[in-house]
Amino acid sequence: MVDNKPIALDDMYNPRWTSGIGVEKEGVCPLCWINGELRTFRTKVSAYWYHMNFFHGISSATCQPYEPPRAVRQVVLTTRLMMEGYCHQCSQWIPLESIKIITVNVRQIYWWKHAQKCHIFPVSKPSPSLPPTIHPTRNTRKRQLTTSNTI
Ligand SMILES: [Zn+2]
Ligand SMILES: [Zn+2]
């Protein structure tokens, strides 16, 4: 095992130890290690990348956990309800489940698959992006009325 320095103190993505070289190179998952498991994944064939992005939800672009949905809602399908999450980055409602009824090992996989393509920049906090259904338009109008009453 060789030490592998994190790119920042809060780097949750990169392995702290690696072994091997070339396609044989493996990285130790820092999060599984914290839980007492020594799990290694090949870094050159995307196994490590896949594990971090879609098992732990750690972005390889930001080295931080993916932002969760800003809001969730249920939509009616023909045979059942399905959850959707609101994405702060693209301002879209994203399915949080498969259209088909299937069992998945990691329930967040649908959100993280979207986030991996969409959340490629660190989030500036606090984010002003709210879903359209929750946007306080009524409050804004009330404030304007209050202002005009006082004039
Ligand atoms: Zn892990
Ligand atoms: Zn998005």
Image (tube, rainbow, N blue to C red):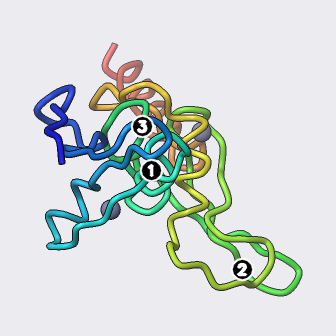
Give the CA separation, mark 1 to mark 2.
Answer: 38 Å
Q: Amino acid at mark 3?
A: Ser
| Circle 3 SS class | loop
Q: Is the CB–ligand 1 distance for label 3 below 8 Å?
A: no
Left or right side of 78 for 37: left
Left or right position of 69 against 104: left
Q: Nearer the viewer, residue 58 or 91?
A: 58
Q: Relative to 128, does residue 39 appear above or below in the rendering?
A: below
Q: Quadrant of ligand 1?
A: bottom left
First of labels 3, 1 by sequence position: 1
Which residue is at 51% across, 48% downward?
A: 134
User: Mark 3–mark 1 contact, CB under 8 Å?
Assistant: no
Tell me which residue sits at (50%, 41%) in the image: 23
Q: Are marks 1 and 2 in contact (CB under 8 Å)?
A: no
Helix, strand or loop at mark 2: strand
**Quadrant housing the C terminus:** top left
Work out whether residue 4 or residue 117 is closer to the camera in this orientation and state it.
4
The Cα–Cα distance between marks 3 and 1, rounded to whole angstroms, is: 15 Å
Residue to which mark 1 is pinned: 42
* Mark whose residue sits in front, 3 or 1: 1
Residue receiving disc 2: 81
Q: Amino acid at mark 1?
A: Arg
Location of mark 3 (residue): 60
**Residue 102 located left or right of residue 67:** right
Mark 3: give few (<14), some (14-19) or many (20+) Cα within 10 Å: many
Provide the secondary structure element on which disc 1 rests: strand
Label 1 or label 2, whichever lies nearer to me, is 1
CA separation in Å, label 3 and label 2: 32 Å
Q: Which mark is residue 20?
A: none
User: In the image, residue 72 lies at what x, y percent?
Assistant: 53, 61
The amino acid sitting under disc 2 is Leu
Q: Is residue 12 above or below residue 5?
A: below
